[in-house]
């Protein structure tokens, strides 16, 4: 089991992931991975709390894998959120952080 | 075109100010997401995969150069330098910050635009023939009636909480360019035997998960009765439309469950109570609105015929563009120019700020300051003198907008799909790009002739796949994208819903499948004049099935 917590930031809607330091990060690479049920529960609680604190919206725990040390979301939808539009690689995270990994 | 009066200006300004306050209260935490979400949606602000999305209304797809320049400025200053023109003749921005949206709406209000009713269970942007007021085959301009419907339905308390969203389209020619038969209400403006104007009224069409062709419930409704009759339809829907299941809440379901005859009876009964009320449109009011849409004074420019003939001879690219993208105007010295937003390998419907500004400049200089957005995700300059076509072409060429493919196989409608949309199950744009690249040769495209490919990334059908001659629907199957192909759909005066041809195709096999379908058609057509759709209607799905799957194939 490997899961991370994702959401969109309230103020600008940008996709973010919860980091180990409790901060919402713009890059999935530094997201905190929950590897057992208790950790997943903690992520869910952290998500509810951040939602209630009006920091983020559309909070969701998603399945990921680790490939060569990189976090790789299982669903294409989440890979596209993590990278940016596959048809505009000059936009989104892929343009800011690293080459596209979505598709 | 219509200009805001003081009431309109005040109304939109007040709405922006109200929204600004709502956003501030949301940012401060005074209101939570549950309370805020419906408020932002009422102002066209969605949340998508990467960011918020703002959908701006372009009433019946008509705008002027000042408005287009403002759309370009918003793209540049508040977004990432581009916008996406939609199948509802609107524009969407993909990256606005929530905190910037009140300022964007203020910018829009300054040029008489807004984002009201571009979302939610209300009457959405009324769409119309994008060649309105210009087409040679038009009976009358449908836009005054679309404007009357817009004013009547804007912020109408009775229609703010409908069972589901509601879409109206109006066309003013026998050739239906507004796809009225796949709308909740479709209005076909025409003249009766006495020469009076009125409408054939179609109700209960739609796409989405349950595609239905509308039923014609009245062959001729006098124009003065437009609002009373529409109100009668809305009241029957508002009263009896299902609210227990959002997938069964559109009026098409009500019409089907009630039965066409009984539904019509209910509407007519309701109308009897309304037809002689204040909803009857006085001739003076009709004339006042129509005056806003008075055709531009077009001077004779007969020199254009000679100029254009010489230019076509000198430049085959120009000749091809005129042939494909310029449609006859009611004035013989003029043409209707379709500006394709489908460059080979490009993103259907996208335009950057420079391109939008170029179109604005051209409209101002050569096009009587009018621009249209088509539901096929192209732009239109409706009134260009033939004598000016070469200038227009060269300016478009310089910014990558002179693709000569209007109505051809690479003029593909595609929704944003999984590259942007939170509802999508599969990507649409890359599929469109690959097909467009495969059929890049203009010579080959012209040999194939008229062929409309439409692609949706989910069952909601924003890419109109049900009415594509070749429709492609992206689904998610076992975690991967899969594309289902339908054939024989059409969104015109002879509307048909495409039939699923068989099991779906993996992403890397879709273009091959489309090519197989096209080659099968080319091999079976009676002559070069028989279009894909005509050939499909004549020969049916069997040869295409066989070509795609072999003789023993079965539909998935």
Image (spheres, coloured by chain):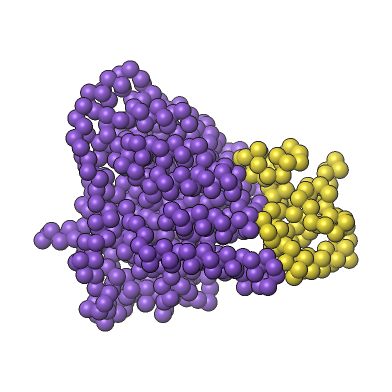
Q: Residue B156: where, in percent of width, then height?
A: 41, 72
Q: Quadrant of residue A99?
A: top right
For residue B16, above or below residue A78:
below
Colour chosen for chain B: purple
Q: Residue B359: where, in percent of width, then height?
A: 42, 38
Which residue is at a point 44% across and 46% down the rendered structure image? Answer: B68
Q: Quadrant of residue B453?
A: top left
Colour chosen for chain A: yellow
**Nearest the camera: B446 or B192?**
B192
Left or right of B466 on screen, residue A97: right
Q: Residue B263: where, in percent of width, then height?
A: 33, 75
Q: Which quarter of the rendering shows the N terminus of chain A?
A: bottom right
**Nearest the camera: B459 or B355?**
B355
Which residue is at a point 89% across and 66% down the rendered structure image? Answer: A38
For residue B260, above or below residue B60:
below
Which residue is at a point 27% across and 29% down the rendered structure image? Answer: B387
């Amino acid at each position: 089991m490997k899961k991370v917590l994702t959401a969109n930031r309230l103020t600008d809607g940008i996709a973010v992931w919860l980091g180990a330091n409790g901060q919402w990060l713009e890059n999935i690479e530094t997201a905190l991975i929950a590897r057992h049920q208790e950790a997943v529960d903690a992520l869910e609680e952290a998500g509810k709390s951040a939602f209630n604190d009006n920091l983020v919206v559309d909070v969701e725990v998603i399945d990921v894998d680790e490939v060569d040390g990189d976090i790789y979301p299982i669903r294409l939808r989440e890979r596209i959120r993590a990278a940016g539009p596959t048809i505009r690689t000059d936009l989104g995270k892929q343009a800011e952080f690293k080459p596209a990994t979505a598709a | 075109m219509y200009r805001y009066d003081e009431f309109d200006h005040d109304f939109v300004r007040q709405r922006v100010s109200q929204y600004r306050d709502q956003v501030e209260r949301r940012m401060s935490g005074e209101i939570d997401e549950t309370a805020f979400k419906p408020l932002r949606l009422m102002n066209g602000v969605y949340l998508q995969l990467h960011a918020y999305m703002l959908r701006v209304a372009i009433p019946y797809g008509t705008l002027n150069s000042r408005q287009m320049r403002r759309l370009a400025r918003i793209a540049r200053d508040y977004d990432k330098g581009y916008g996406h023109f939609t199948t509802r003749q609107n524009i969407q921005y993909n990256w606005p910050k929530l905190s910037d949206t009140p300022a964007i709406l203020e910018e829009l209000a300054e040029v008489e635009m807004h984002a009201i009713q571009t979302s939610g269970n209300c009457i959405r942007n009324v769409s119309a023939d994008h060649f309105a007021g210009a087409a040679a085959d038009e009976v009358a301009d449908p836009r005054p009636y679309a404007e009357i419907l817009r004013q009547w339905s804007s912020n109408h308390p009775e229609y703010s909480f409908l069972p589901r969203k509601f879409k109206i389209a109006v066309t003013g020619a026998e050739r239906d360019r507004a796809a009225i038969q796949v709308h909740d209400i479709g209005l076909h403006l025409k003249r009766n035997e006495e020469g009076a104007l009125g409408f054939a009224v179609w109700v209960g069409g739609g796409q989405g998960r349950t595609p239905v062709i509308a039923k014609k419930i009245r062959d001729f409704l006098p124009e003065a009765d437009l609002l009373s009759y529409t109100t009668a339809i809305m009241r029957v829907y508002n009263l009896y439309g299902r609210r227990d299941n959002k997938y069964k809440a559109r009026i098409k379901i009500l019409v089907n469950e009630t039965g066409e005859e009984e539904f019509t009876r209910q509407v007519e009964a309701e109308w009897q109570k309304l037809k002689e009320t204040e909803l009857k449109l006085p001739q003076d009011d009709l004339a006042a609105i129509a005056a806003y849409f008075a055709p531009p004074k077009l001077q004779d420019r007969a020199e254009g015929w000679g100029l254009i003939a010489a230019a076509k001879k000198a430049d085959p690219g120009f000749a091809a563009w005129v042939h494909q993208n310029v449609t006859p105007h009611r004035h013989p010295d003029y043409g209707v120019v379709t500006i394709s937003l489908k460059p080979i390998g490009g993103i259907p419907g996208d335009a950057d700020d420079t391109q939008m500004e170029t179109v604005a400049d051209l409209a101002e200089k050569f096009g009587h300051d009018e621009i249209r957005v088509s539901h096929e995700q192209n732009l239109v300059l409706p009134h260009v003198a033939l004598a000016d076509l070469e200038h227009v072409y060269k300016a478009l060429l310089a910014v990558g907008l002179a693709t000569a493919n209007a109505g051809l196989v690479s003029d593909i409608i595609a929704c944003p799909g999984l590259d942007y949309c939170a509802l999508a199950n599969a990507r649409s744009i890359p599929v469109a790009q690959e097909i467009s690249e495969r059929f890049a040769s203009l010579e080959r495209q012209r040999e194939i002739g008229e062929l409309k490919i439409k692609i949706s990334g989910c069952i909601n059908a924003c890419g109109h796949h049900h009415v594509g001659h070749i429709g492609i629907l992206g689904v998610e199957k076992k975690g991967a994208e899969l594309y289902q192909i339908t054939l024989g759909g059409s969104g015109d005066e002879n509307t048909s819903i495409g039939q699923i041809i068989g099991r779906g195709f993996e992403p890397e096999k879709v273009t091959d499948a489309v090519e197989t379908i096209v080659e099968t058609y080319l091999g079976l057509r009676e002559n070069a004049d028989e279009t894909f759709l005509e050939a499909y209607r004549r020969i049916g799905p069997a040869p295409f099935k066989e070509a795609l799957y072999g003789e023993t194939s079965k539909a998935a």
